[in-house]
Image (spheres, rainbow, N blue to C red):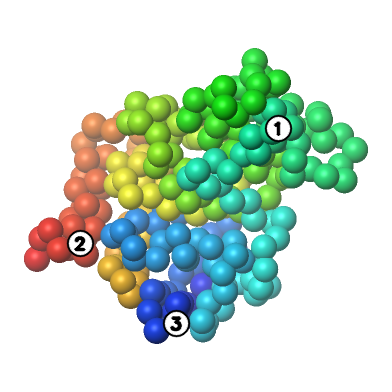
Amino acid sequence: MISCEKIVKKFDDLLVIDGVNLNIKDGEFLVILGPSGCGKSTFLSMLAGFEKPTSGTISINGNEITKPGKDRGFVFQDYALFPWLTVLGNVMSGLNGKANKKEIAMENIRRVGLEEFTNEYPHKLSGGMKQRVAIARVLAYDPEILLMDEPFGALDAQTRKLMQQELKKILKDIRKTIVFVTHSVIEAVYLADRVVVFSKRPSKIVYEEEIHIEGQRNYFNEQFMKYRERILHHLDVETGIVE
């Protein structure tokens, strides 16, 4: 569905990404890991159309990305909610022009389990609840692709674990292609169909792992731990922890 060919990104003389080739399948949950500052978020911004590659092409179903589009929804780490709008108002905010936007918004508010908070403002919500609103807002306009930039990175460990589980439930009956950036190997193994590890800057892809775990994923079962250790090793090599 998404094809990235020889992607190079520079900011003035700083080379951030150096020749990334990546194909992402329709309906795949792809997680990108890598050292801090390696360009993971920059890469996601190019998929969104917020940034343009210095060279190379990114295309969706054969059409080159040149700008943001309704086929892609972006979930930010900092929620990016409008503080003057209620939960309902925030979820409706991306539905201008749709006659039944309230019904669509309410369907997605229920989907993320916030129907009791429909008329509350963001300042009254916890971090996890705010991120649910952000996810509901993106799901409401039904993009083909979800781009998620460390969406749970600002949450405490327990809330983060809960949100990982909730995201799996939310997406169970919704077919989306997802590209998800995180620093957490455990989060990557729990969520992903495939994990891609970026090198330190300038970034290249140095490792890929498809995740196949029988039954419901458990953070501590043997299969899970083997994937975690393998991916963590390659990440540690990039961060200089091991030779």
Q: Position of residue 128 (x, y in %)?
A: 48, 29
Q: Quadrant of residue 51?
A: bottom right
The residues bearing labels 1 and 3 have C-alpha atoms spaced at a distance of 39 Å
Mark 2, residue position:
239
Q: Residues within 10 Å of mark 1 (few under 14, many from 20)?
A: some
Q: Nearer the viewer, residue 123 or 22?
A: 123
Q: Amino acid at mark 3?
A: Asp
Q: Residue furthest right?
A: 99
In this view of the protein, which residue sits in the foreground, 57 or 50? 50
Q: CA distance from mark 3 to mark 2?
A: 25 Å
Provide residue 215's location: percent of width, then percent of height.
Answer: 38, 32
Q: Residue at x 57, y 74 (%)?
A: 52
Instruction: Give the mark nearer the N terminus: 3 vs 2.
Output: 3
Q: Is residue 184 left or right of residue 134?
A: left
First in sequence, mark 1 or 3: give its number. 3
Residue ID for mark 3: 12
Residue farthest top in this picture: 116
Instruction: Say which element carries label 2.
Output: helix
Alpha-carbon span between mark 1 and mark 2: 42 Å
Name the secondary structure under disc 3: loop
* Percent x, y of residue 90: 69, 35
Q: Is residue 178 visible?
A: no
**Can residue 99 be spotted in the picture?**
yes
Secondary-structure class at tag 1: loop
- Circle 1 residue: 85
User: What amino acid is found at the position of numbered circle 1 in the picture?
Assistant: Leu
Question: How many labels were placed on the picture?
Answer: 3
Q: Could you tell me the amino acid type at mark 2?
A: Thr
